[in-house]
Image (cartoon, grey):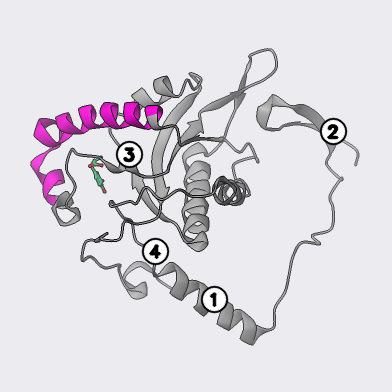
Amino acid sequence: MNRQYKVFYPKNLVSFVDKDDFIPFSSYKSYPIEQMQRRSEDFLSNIQRRRTIRHFSDKPVPKEIIENCLKAAGTAPSGANRQPWHFSVISDQEIKKQIRHAAEEEEKKFYSGRAPDEWLEALEPLGTDENKPFLEVAPYLIVIFSEVHGLDSEGEKINNYYVSESVGIATGMLITALHNAGLATLTHTPSPMNFLRKILKRGKNERTFLILVTGFPSDDAKVPNITKKNLDEYTTFI
Ligand code: IYR
């Protein structure tokens, strides 16, 4: 069969590929079972050390490390391979300050009335409040946008599929890559987040997904004394 399918790539590059134009999966790497066992254990003990932190150092992080982690995120699977994400990476001190001020404005409203008491109670163990100094202190703020729909070269809408799932997966891979590189992160969601699209001059077809704050933890960083569920609490094998 030789049918041709229209395929949309990021940056609205439109091309035609042949449905039969599949290539061998030569990047696949297999390991002996014992090695697989060992690798899964090693990965588990590494990822179990990940914690969300709110106390960052201003120690600079080489841009190449961030770029590599973003490239790792960019390998994420996505609905129809539309890759409906955009990462705005902010190290500019002035923009960080603007973001902090705008976020704190929203958070003040959240903590002093907008959030129901029950939500504030749920947040108590995390010790969060309206002050967000980390938005200025951390060397990088990665603001993640979901592309609700794409645009072709004529400005016509291109559908994206499973956008939240796709952007969520890419974000998870980014968090994992940053942790693996030796950086700490905070997933921060000031609500509402519309101000970020304006400050960062993103298109109307994009929605702010979240801010990923990243850098080194400060020397005196503390984390809440909370635990994760056990496997049997969130899994059923059938
Ligand atoms: N956006 C607020 C509140 C907040 C909400 C949730 I759900 C959290 O897990 C943590 C915080 C803030 O960042 O303080």
Q: Which residues are magenta?
A: 94-121
Residue 29 in the image: x percent, y percent? 73, 70
Residue 13 in the image: x percent, y percent? 74, 27
| Residues at discs 1 and 4 in contact (Cβ within 8 Å) | no
Instruction: Depth check: give the residue in front, 44 or 219.
Output: 219
Residue 95 in the image: x percent, y percent? 39, 27
> What residue did someone put label 3 on?
135
Disc 3 from disc 1: Cα separation: 34 Å
Disc 2 from disc 1: Cα separation: 40 Å
> What residue did someone put label 1 on?
40
Asked which secondary structure carries label 1, the reply is helix
> What residue did someone put label 4 on?
50
User: Counting residues from the N terminus, which is met first, the one under dot 3 or under dot 2?
Assistant: 2
Label 3: how many Cα within 10 Å (few below 14, some 14–19, many 20+): many
Tell me if residue 142 can be seen.
yes
Asked which secondary structure carries label 3, the reply is helix
User: Counting residues from the N terminus, which is met first, the one under dot 2 or under dot 1?
Assistant: 2
Asked which secondary structure carries label 4, the reply is loop
Q: Is residue 157 above or below residue 141?
A: above
Instruction: Depth check: give the residue in front, 139 or 178.
Output: 139
Comparing marks 4 and 3, which lies closer to the viewer? 3
Disc 2 from disc 4: Cα separation: 45 Å
Identified by mark 1, the residue type is Ser
Q: Is residue 215 magenta?
A: no
**Dot label at residue 4:** 2
Ligand 1 quadrant in view: top left
Label 2: how many Cα within 10 Å (few below 14, some 14–19, many 20+): few
